[in-house]
Image: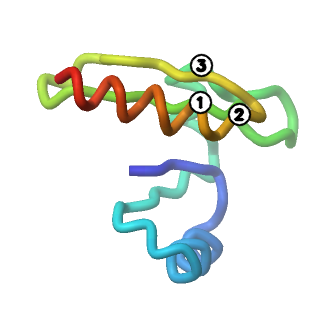
Amino acid sequence: MGISADPVDQQKEFDDKNSLGFPLLSDPDRDIAKAFGVKRMGPLPSKRATFVIGTDRRLVKSIRSETDMIKHADEALEALRAL
């Protein structure tokens, strides 16, 4: 799943355009961002992070990069394949 502070209508538009195939959740108050340690102060967007969470609800991998989306994808897939 993906989570961002974007409103639901923007997320739907993004999903319709990109056919993601997974749910997008809206975190407008950034409570989830705060819980995962990616909330920034003020109106700035949350820090970009990917979390791989196992079926046992444990954190398997945390990937953080503001600019390298390939890193997020590659490391997340590697962690999923290792499960």
Please give the residue where the numbered disc 3 appears in the rendered image. Answer: 37
Mark 2, other Cα within 10 Å: few <14 / some 14–19 / many ≥20: few
Please give the residue where the numbered disc 2 appears in the rendered image. Answer: 68
* Secondary element type, mark 1: helix
User: In the displayed structure, would residue 69 be above or below residue 6?
Assistant: above
Q: Quadrant of residue 67?
A: top right
Closer to viewer: mark 2 or mark 3: 2
60 vs 3, left or right, is left
Q: Earlier in the sequence, mark 1 or mark 3?
A: 3
Residue 70: percent from the left, percent from the top? Answer: 61, 38
Which residue does the image show at 51% across and 32% down from the upper left?
50
Which residue does the image show at 20% across and 24% down from the upper left?
57
Q: Earlier in the sequence, mark 2 or mark 3?
A: 3
What distance separates the C-alpha of mark 1 from that of mark 2?
5 Å
* Secondary element type, mark 3: loop
Which residue does the image show at 39% across and 18% down from the upper left?
61
